[in-house]
Image (cartoon, helix red, strand yellow):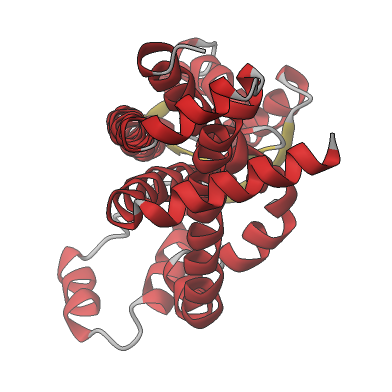
Amino acid sequence: MLTNLKRIFRFGWQGFTRNKGLGFQVIFIMTVAVFLITFLFLFQGLSDFLITQAQKKVDISVYFHRETPEEEILEVEKELYKFSGEVESVDYVSKEKAQELFIQKHQGEPLYLQALKEVGENPFLASLNIKAKNPTQYAQISEFLTHGPFKNLIQKVSYYENKKVIDRLFALTSNIKTGTIILSLILAGLVILITFNTIKLTILSSKEEISTMRLVGASSWFIRGPFLIQSIIYGVLAVFITNLIFGVSLNFLNPKLQIWLLDFNLLTFFQENFPFLLSVQFVFALGLGIASFFLAVRKYLEV
């Protein structure tokens, strides 16, 4: 049994080296396909991180009509805590405080300060800045403010503007994921087609050897085994090359990428999830190779 396995592996390697040109084409296309699957996995981690960070920074700013008394605004603050246990904090910003914050922010920009002077009176509105424990609660809180008992006091709620930013970010990441999946499926089809043709040519070029094996009573799997090994070699090499590219690239580029990606550490994410990612890569690559093997052997190798 062990001797037969060694021979199957040897014949499989010989078949791989005999068709180097076609073999390299298969490995190249399969590497691109595995590369895209790996990119999709890393992009999923990145998009989840970006959306979470964006949600953390989202809050609700409720601006009140200029004539609204401070007592009524503070009453709204109390009611918000009663309305939802998900409210983490509510900060009251008076008109005077809003003006002070604006001046501090634009201290070195005379154009803004001059415009404020020309307005004369304080143009800012009193507001409540609301932070929720769970970002999913903002819609409910916003609905309470815009349609609840205090709606006549409120001039504007900023949540919907912030929500549009998150929705656009979510839509963008979803579109990129969809595009990557479609491209991966197209490449998967190409991998199967090219691997199929490579095994077909290997079978046709090995007709005499196969006939000899049949004459001496070789089993079906002894004849088919080398072609399966050949398909597995393609998948293993594609996975190895892909991880080599990502490993080397991330080691060199991660410091710069971390700055661009809002402190998301792609290298750490890659390393921490490598066992799972490796299993996904192998299932994908070997699945393509084995599918091609069965299609080619079923059509061109009658054993």
Compared with 140, 165 (above or below) is below
61 horizontally vs 20: left or right: right
User: Can residue 276 be seen here?
Assistant: yes
Viewport quadrant of the N terminus: top right
Q: Horizontal and vertical percent for residue 87?
A: 71, 32
Q: Residue at x 61, y 18 (%)?
A: 220
Q: Position of residue 71 (x, y in %)?
A: 62, 36
Residue 163 position in % (x across, y down): 41, 33
Q: Position of residue 268 (x, y in %)?
A: 67, 65
Q: Residue at x 29, y 29 (%)?
A: 193
Q: Return the residue found at the far bottom.
A: 108
* Depth check, front residue: 197 or 170: 197
Residue 63 as seen in the image, left or right of residue 274:
left
Residue at x-position 62% and y-position 25%: 216
Farthest-out residue, front: 215
- Pick the residue in front: 290 or 76: 290
On screen, residue 118 versus residue 303, left or right, reads left
- In this view, which residue lies farthest toward the right? 1
Residue 67 appears in the rendering: no
